[in-house]
Amino acid sequence: MDEAIRKTIQAILDGQRIMSVATLRPDGWPQATTVGYVNDGLTLYFLCGPDSQKAANLARDNRMSLTINPDAGQLMQITGLSMAAHAEKVEDPDEAEKVLQLMPAKYPVQEGLAIAMPTRDQICIFRVVPKVISVLDYSKGFGHADLVTL
């Protein structure tokens, strides 16, 4: 992968914390939802409820698509990422703990939070491993995207 593209991808991942994910429902329709994420390099992680539709969809078919799009004040400043990826449930307690340790950096102390954060036993953590990344950068031309295959 070109180093400039890698730096662009990393900057977007590091600078954001919300992504839209699309998983496949049992009837074949995509289901898009918004989730928070943390990342370790180009690997992303998100949490969800063990009984959620996302968890059920990914247990059946771990393919997913996602987008991460910083807000842009001007049309030609639009940037973002879209990815085709595989989501794998994190089973290793050490990896799960590492993910939970990454959370405070992306999500500082939440003022007025009236609920306790869930424990590792109450959630599913998914590791998102990108296979194809489209890097959108309108500053290079309207709708310009660079495609990276991993």
Image (cartoon, rainbow, N blue to C red):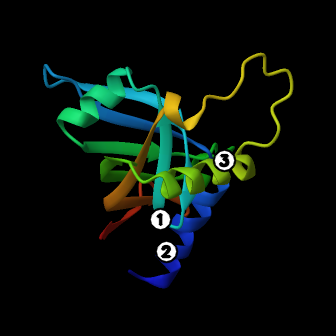
Q: Which mark is residue 62?
A: none
Residue at x 52% of width, y 80% of height: 4
- What residue do we see at 36% from left, 60% from top? 133
* 133 w.r.t. 115: above or below: below
The disc label shown at residue 6, or none: 2
Q: Please state the horizontal and vertical placement of residue 102, each as a whole percent of the image.
A: 65, 54
The image quarter in which residue 49 lies: top left
Residue 46 drawn at (x, y percent): 49, 42
On-image quarter of the C terminus: bottom left
Q: Is residue 149 visible?
A: yes
> What's the mark number on residue 103?
3
- Nearer the observer, disc 2 or disc 1? 1
Q: Which mark is residue 42?
A: 1
Query: Looking at the image, is mark 3 or mark 2 nearer the viewer?
Result: 3
Q: CA distance from mark 3 to mark 2?
A: 23 Å
Could you tell me how far apart the alpha carbons at marks 1 and 3 are, in whole angstroms? 16 Å
Which circle's residue, 1 or 3, is located before the other in the chain? 1
Asked which quadrant contains residue 108, the reply is top right
Question: Mark 2 or 1 closer to N-term?
Answer: 2
Q: Quadrant of the N terminus?
A: bottom left
Q: Residue furthest bottom?
A: 3
Say if 49 sits above or below 37 in the image: above
Left or right: residue 82 versus residue 15 is left
Please tell me which residue lies in front, 33 or 2.
33
Element type where label 2 sits in the image = helix
